[in-house]
Image (spheres, grey):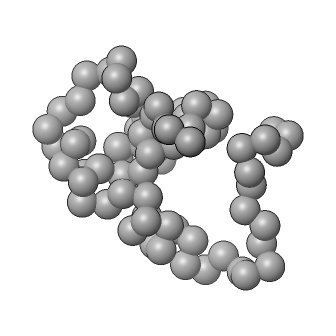
Amino acid sequence: LDPEWASYNIGIFICTRCSGVHRSMGVHISKVNHLKLDRWEDSQIERMKEVGNIKAKFKYEERVPPCYRRPKEDDPQ
């Protein structure tokens, strides 16, 4: 999949569906931009470069139990 959105304060790329979830959390948790349609500050781009999905996965999923099933894109919401 080619993500079209990013949570720039967390430093991750996300799909359209997840962008809605992140927006509903509030900007105090996740700040979302469209990759092509929104204006990007240099600091936001740097954050994306320094974190990225792989590093964020290790940080935010560190304590998720192995038995937890990760949601898939086609799962019902």
Q: Is residue 74 left or right of residue 64?
A: right
Q: Is residue 39 left or right of residue 22?
A: left
Quadrant housing residue 24 = top right
Indicate the position of residue 52 as horizontal and vertical percent values. Answer: 36, 57
Going by the picture, which residue comes out furthest to the left? 42
Indicate the position of residue 38 as horizontal and vertical percent values. Answer: 33, 21
Going by the picture, which residue comes out furthest to the front? 1
Image point (35%, 43%), residue name: 8
Inspect this view and state whether residue 50 appears: yes
Image point (37%, 30%), residue name: 35
Indicate the position of residue 75 as horizontal and vertical percent values. Answer: 82, 45
Indicate the position of residue 31 as horizontal and vertical percent values. Answer: 41, 38
**Camera-side residue: 77 or 36?**
36
Image point (57%, 71%), residue name: 61
Classify the position of the N terminus by image quarter. top right
**Camera-side residue: 4 or 43?**
4
Inspect this view and state whether residue 24 appears: no
Classify the position of the C terminus by image quarter. top right
Identify whether 73 is placed above or below 39: below
Going by the picture, which residue comes out furthest to the right? 76
Image point (80%, 79%), residue name: 67
Identify whether 7 is placed above or below 35: below
Going by the picture, which residue comes out furthest to the top? 37
Total number of numbered discs in the rendering: 0
